[in-house]
Image: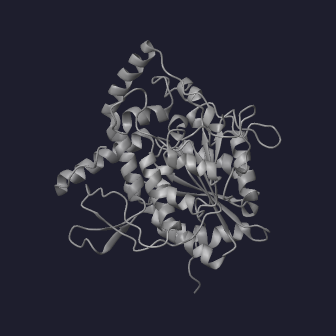
Amino acid sequence: MRGSPVPPVRYPHAVFLENNGKLAPDRNSADDVARLFEEVVPRALEGHAKRRLLLYVHGGLVPEASALEVLDKHRLAFFDDAYPIAVVWRTGLLNTLDYWVADRKEQEGTGGPEALAGGSQMDEPIVPLREGERLVVRALEVLCTRGRFIWNEMKENAHRASVEWGSRDCPKVATEKGGMLVVLDALESLVRKDPDLEVHLMVHSAGAILAAPFVKLWASEGRVPPPPEYVGLGLHPLPRQSGLGRTLHSITFLAPACTMDDFGVYYHDLLEAGRLGKAALYVLSDAAEQADDCIKVYPQSLLYLVSNAFEGVKPSKNEGKPLLGMYRHVVNTPAVRSLLDSGRVELVIAEKTRTPRGDYACKAVHHGDFDTDIETLHSVRVRIREAASMQVPVKGRAGLPLPVGEPETMPPS
């Protein structure tokens, strides 16, 4: 008797994560993810002269329905050049609140501790606030620090997605596996079978936080320590003894919300070594960040709110916690400027940087625009298509040209 037919993969372009970075069982299982990479992707890329996979990680506080709408646009934008797969992690406000409550209840049951609280492209002006505006913004930031637990819950889920867990009774035996580790293993298996497959990564906003440990495990050689330990659920992260030593063909950061500290831990050395391929950092100008708003309440961009309120730094002189996706922090971080100067990373400023055809490479106006902006998606698509032929230069800049009318040298660090 023939066995039952294997059901089709329900979501051939997405992997879904839920609380604590685990796979969302109502959407997919580990078997579903394995079949996605073992069967669906190879079948879709069969016959293509260049086989490319684009892994996309969306930002935080994004409802699942909105993430799927963005994925639909990416399928249209990238499908001819790369097979797009989105990591849809449930970071909507209501989801995150539910997860926080569930985690606190688990902590009460186990007695576990609470989660941690937590002249060139460089010549763009840094815009100071007028005194009256500064007082209003600071008052809102103080109020928003009360909601910091939501941001911390989301970051906690992001970190847990890339670890294996042991229980309190058996802490050295893996009983749980984060969803990004499931993706990591499935992707590595696919690349072993198809060494010519190009792997590209695009992250938006807090997606850079979720992707950071994953990238470290994918591209590092040698021992990789686990992310920060969040043991509130009585689970203990087990370190992967070594990274896979793989490479990416390109990585694109779209207004990343990760701190410069996390950038240094997870991304910097790999970028410097050229293990992440051709990299680009897309940002708003400082003037655009300050003209943006958060749900019509906070009168600046989400990254300003994260920097000045959610990351636990007492606001001082409009600086806040340095973030990779904020132009004002990029220009004041020597490690990032060094990567830009060496050509390891290209800086793309929205409505400033132009393509060789003279068009803007990005026309995002708001923080949330990047992953749906047509010009941004087109320039990323071109970079993916040309990534194999791009060489990371030892000196100078390559790729997207400087904004029109600006000099070719950066001011001193």
Q: Residue furthest bottom?
A: 1
Q: Residue furthest front?
A: 412
**Left or right of 139 in this view: 106:** left
Residue 192 drawn above or below residue 214: below
Snapshot colouring: one colour
Residue at 61% across / 48% down in the picture?
340
Which of the 4 quarters of the picture holds residue 402? top right
Residue 177 drawn above or below residue 351: below
Q: Residue furthest right?
A: 357
Residue at 47% across / 41% down in the picture?
323
Q: In this orientation, which residue lies closer to the viewer: 221 or 38? A: 221
Residue at 61% across / 63% down in the picture?
248
Q: Position of residue 403 (x, y in %)?
A: 72, 36
Q: In this orientation, which residue lies closer to the viewer: 23 or 378? A: 378
Q: Position of residue 358 (x, y in %)?
A: 81, 37
Does the image show residue 28?
no
Q: In this orientation, which residue lies closer to the viewer: 125 or 82? A: 125
In which quadrant is the N terminus drawn?
Answer: bottom right
Does the image show residue 157?
yes
Residue at 48% across / 19% down in the picture?
129
Q: Residue furthest top?
A: 132
Residue 109 drawn above or below residue 410: below
**Left or right of 264 in this view: 114:** left
Q: Position of residue 378 (x, y in %)?
A: 74, 46
Q: Position of residue 123 (x, y in %)?
A: 62, 33
